[in-house]
Amino acid sequence: MKKSRIVLAVTLVLLLASLVTLMSACTTQPPAEKKAFKLGLSIPLTGPAAEKGAPIGHGQLDAFKYINDELGGVAGYKIDPVWYDTNYDSQKATDIAKQLMTDGCLFFTVVASKDMSSSQVIANNAGFPGMVCFSSPSNTHPPAHIYAQLPDYGDDWTAFTKYYLQNIWKGQGKPKMALELLSNSTGFGVRDAARAMADQLGVEIVDTEQHTAKTISETDALNRIKAKNPDILFISSTPAPTAIILKNAYDLKMIPGMTVACAHASFTKALIDAAGKDITEDVFGVYPTVNFGDDVPGMAKMVEYCKARHPEYMGNNDYLVGWASSLVNAEILKQALQNSNVEDLLKGDATSWKLAETNGFMKVKGYDVGGLQGPVDFSDTLDKRGSKSVKIFQIKNGQMVSLSGWVDAPNIQYETLDWFGK
């Protein structure tokens, strides 16, 4: 009997020791944390396009913080945004694209069409998929591995020209239009759209002028335009040069009187701040999102973050573009995770890039970005634009006022035109 008691006591001690060891293991060895996915960002945070790049870039980073902190990432995986400042410099943009590949990013997003023009050659050659926020037709035509978040600058010109002919033009015959274009892809997108569509739509392009991002006066160019007596001046540039153009046109007494319209790279709160509400009064513009503060489902959270983290961009639609860009990035990652082996995606190499494109980008179809922009669809192999519609605005008393609902921007297959890209 005594021996049985001793055996029982020893057994209980051993069981208790095992239980303590098991509990200790459970409390000191938590499950391994999931790895984060690196997504690249190429942002003109400083330099001659900073008035666009800074609000977009901060909107992108703020949205990633929201996705990670409040949504727990994408399917439990955090996003690690790897970003660099291009300074709106072509060589830097090219070097950054190479660096993002070396850094092991799954895909990358570029803010400016000019920067993507410099990055896309090596990205397309490597099969490294990318998305550009503000695009020109040359970024996505011919179709390769670069996608556009929004309609391009050529779409802006086409949409406004149609709106003008239907709602503003009261004269006889074809209205005469002059173009004032930034001397890079921002301006060339409008130039190419006008060349492709002007005759079909029924407008006459009477003059095309170019300027640099650092221009200090466009008086000479505007005098040449004034001599042609156009009905419309269409500007595709960034806010600082556009403000100079408008001030010069005001001094030459071209405005008010002549219809002036801007593509979306020009048309933002920064333009009104730079040129003043009197000079910008009645200027038309095209923009591919809703207006800041509009009553759509995705607005409240974006405004909350903007107010808390970057109040200087309150009312700036460019911040909205950046925020929406990161939501689109998250949807691409979500689709890739649903349709791929996670370990293959985490490698950050050519295999990962191919999966990100075929199982990520190309699986995005009809994604609603909280109503902030048109639905995103990357499934069409010939149309690399995510959303396909824009809105027409006009500046009234220092505010951008929406004049239209969503205006469709049909895809123009530039690659079928023998002059395109030459």
Image (spheres, helix red, strand yellow):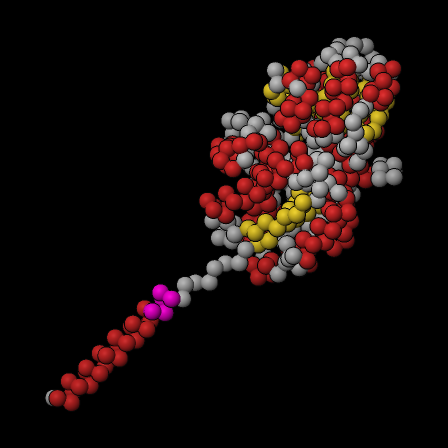
At a point 57% along the width and 27% down the height, the residue shown is: 315
- Bounds of the magenta segment: 24-28
Q: Is residue 260 left or right of residue 20?
A: right
Nearest to the observer: residue 14 or residue 92: 92
Q: Position of residue 382 (x, y in %)?
A: 73, 42
Nearest to the observer: residue 65 or residue 347: 65
- Quadrant housing the N terminus: bottom left
**Figure disc tally:** 0
Q: Position of residue 175 (x, y in %)?
A: 81, 15
Nearest to the observer: residue 170 or residue 381: 170
At a point 74% along the width and 51% down the height, the residue shown is: 95
At a point 70% along the width and 44% down the height, the residue shown is: 86
Quadrant position of residue 102: bottom right
**422 vs 127: above or below:** above
Query: Is residue 11 part of the magenta span, yes or no?
Result: no
**418 vs 345: above or below:** above
Q: Is residue 391 visible?
A: no
Q: Is residue 422 visible?
A: yes
